[in-house]
Image: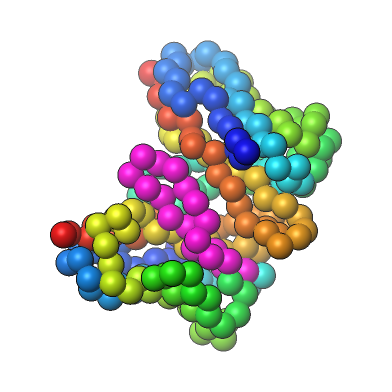
Amino acid sequence: KNEVEQSPQNLTAQEGEFITINCSYSVGISALHWLQQHPGGGIVSLFMLSSGKKKHGRLIATINIQEKHSSLHITASHPRDSAVYICAVRRTGNQFYFGTGTSLTVIP
Amino acid sequence: NAGVTQTPKFQVLKTGQSMTLQCAQDMNHEYMSWYRQDPGMGLRLIHYSVGAGITDQGEVPNGYNVSRSTTEDFPLRLLSAAPSQTSVYFCASSPRGGVTKNIQYFGAGTRLSVL
């Protein structure tokens, strides 16, 4: 069993739809990260959370420490949001455990 | 600002060959890590370093060596390549402190095939 589980694995949405990607983890963490991997393979960090909620443009990330759960929301989705979204949890020091990713396709 | 630079971008090896994947960062980050990404699996940590001269094993270290002689460079060595090491390799760095503390910055990746 992975320490980090994401759902859904694949997601197709129409442009403009509200999208939610979920991440559950089973270990104690010091922070949770959401990453975006573009079709070309590059990975960028979107958010780092240890509590509450963060917003950046159309992206919103929330975390519930007690329930060991985080969500990434995309409002007014756009084809350029098509990517793989990866949840990662940071344990002690600088060691991360990663989910397998959610592949999002937004259709015009 | 180049960020994290990985070379090469692509490499094909024969079983038993050795090679070094290069990783350099120009952000003066203390932490550096090597990951491999395989289909259907999350990124897995191979080796990491918390500063020059200090390295440690991650989740899947077998068959790989690392060293950290400077803050900037963190090369990954494949001692005797095996087909099981066919993967995409990512190097990442992060600062220990400051506003972007623990945010990871990734290189573009190296796609390695071992025949």
- Left or right: A56, with A104 as reference point: right
Give the quarter of the image for residue A5: bottom left
- Whether residue A51 is visible here, answered yes or no, is yes
Query: Which quadrant holds the C terminus of chain B?
Result: top left
Give the quarter of the image for residue B37: top left
Q: Residue A52's x, y, as percent? A: 56, 82
Name the residue located 52 percent from the left edge and 56 percent from the top edge. Answer: A45
Name the residue located 66 percent from the left edge and 28 percent from the top edge. Answer: B75
Q: Is residue A79 above or below residue B81?
A: below
Name the residue located 49 percent from the left edge and 37 percent from the top edge. Answer: B108
Q: Residue B114's x, y, as percent? A: 42, 22
Q: Is residue A45 above or below residue B114?
A: below
Query: Which quadrant holds the N terminus of chain B?
Result: top right
Tell me if residue A38 is in the magenta stretch.
yes
Tell me if residue B12 is in the magenta stretch.
no
Q: Nearer the viewer, residue B106 or B79?
A: B106
- What is the span of residues highlighted in magenta in the rendered image? A31-48
Q: Residue B62's x, y, as percent? A: 60, 34
